[in-house]
Amino acid sequence: MNSAPLTSEAIHAELERVRADFHALVTEATPADLRRPSSGTRWTNGQLLFHMFFGYLIVRRLLPLVRLMGRLPDQVSRSFARALEAGTGAFHVINYQSDRGAARVIHGPRLIRWFDRTLDILQARLKTESEDALARGMHMPVHWDPYFRDWMSLAEIYHYGTQHYDHHRQQLTLSRAP
């Protein structure tokens, strides 16, 4: 979705594309595929699949924060983003280790159910967002993720999950990737 406008309809469509792709990836991956190292990360394919799902959990948790910060003076979110930046090293360690552990427990059909439930919640919430709400935003900790920019609108936060997904999708080394 590089050049298409970031509308609710476009975000909904990309979430449905990702849902179908994720289902295929998880159901077609063999146990050997899941244990194989991914390309360009320290995770296995199984751990990376969980991490791809986790990106949407992050979106879900960011939405109320962005809604709040979008109503406050700009300096509030700028200061908050700076405070988060100070914890970048710890964030990366926790992000890596938590996904490794979670992938041991949440995989296969359970991972698909959690993924679907998360996308369903995001899509239901997206339907209720006004254009004004989607345009408000906040400053972000840019070193936490390559797709975080200094300031992001609520629409961009919804879209972030798919940017994150598509980035990591390219790092999977599954033998029969759809």
Image (cartoon, rainbow, N blue to C red):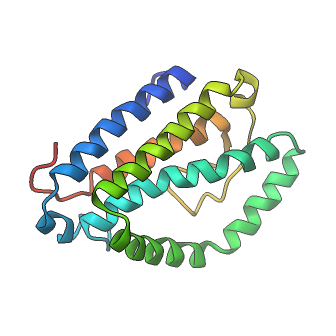
Q: In the rendered picture of this protein, how many numbered marks are placed on residues?
A: 0
Which residue is painted at 40% across and 77% down in the image?
101
State the quadrant of the C terminus: top left
Q: Nearer the viewer, residue 92 or 98?
A: 98
- Tell me where residue 36 appears, x and y as whole percent: 17, 70
**Residue 124 appears in the rendering:** yes
The residue at 59%/37% (across/down) is: 156
Vertical arrangement, residue 112 with respect to residue 99, above or below: above
Q: Is residue 40 visible?
A: no
Q: Quadrant of the N terminus?
A: top left
The residue drawn where x is 18% and y is 59% is 173
The x, y position of residue 55, in whole percent, is: 48, 54
- The residue drawn where x is 33% and y is 67% is 47
The answer to whether 68 appears left or right of 127 in the picture is right
Identify whether 37 is placed above or below 78. below
User: What is the quadrant of residue 17 in the picture?
Assistant: top left
User: Compared to 146, does 66 lie above or below?
Assistant: above
Q: Position of residue 159 (x, y in %)?
A: 52, 38
| Nearer to the camera, 13 or 159 | 13
Where in the figure is residue 118, as x and y percent of width and height?
A: 50, 46
Residue placed most toward the observer, 146 or 136? 136
Taking the image as shown, residue 110 lies to the left or right of residue 137, namely left
Foreground of the two, 99 or 69: 99
Q: Is residue 33 left or right of residue 39?
A: left
